[in-house]
Amino acid sequence: MKDYILKALAFNNEARVYVANTTETVAEIVRRHEALPAAAAALGRSTTAGAIMGAMLKGDQRLTLRIEGNGPIGKIVVDANAKGEVGGYCDHPHVHFHNTQTGKVDVRAVVGTQGTIRVVKDIGLRELFTSESAMVSGEIGEDIAYYFTVSEQVPSVVAVGVYINPENQIESAGGFIIQLLPDASEQTIVAIEAALAQMPATVELLHEGKTPEEILTLLAGADAQILETLPIGFHCQCSFERFARGMIALGEDEIRNMIADGGAQAQCHFCNEVYEFDVPQLEILLADAKRKK
Ligand SMILES: [Zn+2]
């Protein structure tokens, strides 16, 4: 089953519901970074939340979700857009903890419980929009829900999860976000709370083979109205040209140093791709940097 996000209207048309299967996308990102289980779960939950947040945008709009807690994983960064293209990385993928009581991976221990959630949106205007909130739990889902509620004033429920088997492979990943529309009634809020109380973990349902459509029905009932189905997948924005522009921006002295070193390498954080710049290429960039002055 390919990854996709369902966008729906439900709960008496007073809430938006997004349900995502992100299994392949998360597996690809975790594989590229060789993340250990707890780091993989943290990165996967963040990727799922970021992918859904990207699906809330339109056209060429894009966003970066940055989760910077005080845990050993460092910062987690997810890039996503309205077309369903998602990339992500974390500073330290080789960290792992598990809860000795439950035997499950301990996401909070790697992410930390204090820090910030920052969202930078590029909606096609000159300025980027940045908003942030404090981290409240370190479990990712609750942190993103808090971000929506306090920074965007949209009361939200965020449930994201990753199922990792004993061989440390990603078997399923996904989740849902419910957002109340501005004039939602008290009845709707009560109905959502009741729905959440009986809802098994989405990742368990995906693992049992349930589709996002079936999960939507379990969550919001049969009258939930699907508005759109957005295919999603791993995609990196990086290119040789993009790194070349970055090199030019570093300035003439930096480029001269690279030439003196006999060449330079740049590695993309998101996909781990390495770009090599040899001396003749750097000479061209140096000329461009001089012209830009
Ligand atoms: Zn890349």
Image (tube, helix red, strand yellow):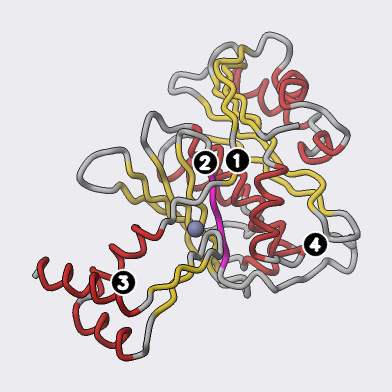
Q: Which residue is mark 1?
A: 233
Label 1, label 3: how many angstroms apart (C-alpha)? 32 Å
**Mark whose residue sits in front, 2 or 3:** 3
Q: Earlier in the sequence, mark 3 or mark 4?
A: 4
Q: Residue at left 44%, top 56%?
A: 238
As drawn, the label of residue 105 is 4
Q: Which residue is mark 3?
A: 281
Disc 2 marks a residue whose amino acid type is Glu
Q: Earlier in the sequence, mark 1 or mark 4?
A: 4
Check if mark 1's residue and mark 2's residue have beta carbons within 8 Å: yes
Q: Which residues are magenta?
A: 85-90
Some atom of ligand 1 lies within 8 Å of the CB belonging to the residue at label 1: no
Q: Nearer the viewer, residue 32 or 239?
A: 239
- Under circle 4, the secondary element is loop
Disc 3 marks a residue whose amino acid type is Gln
Q: Residue at left 21%, top 84%?
A: 253
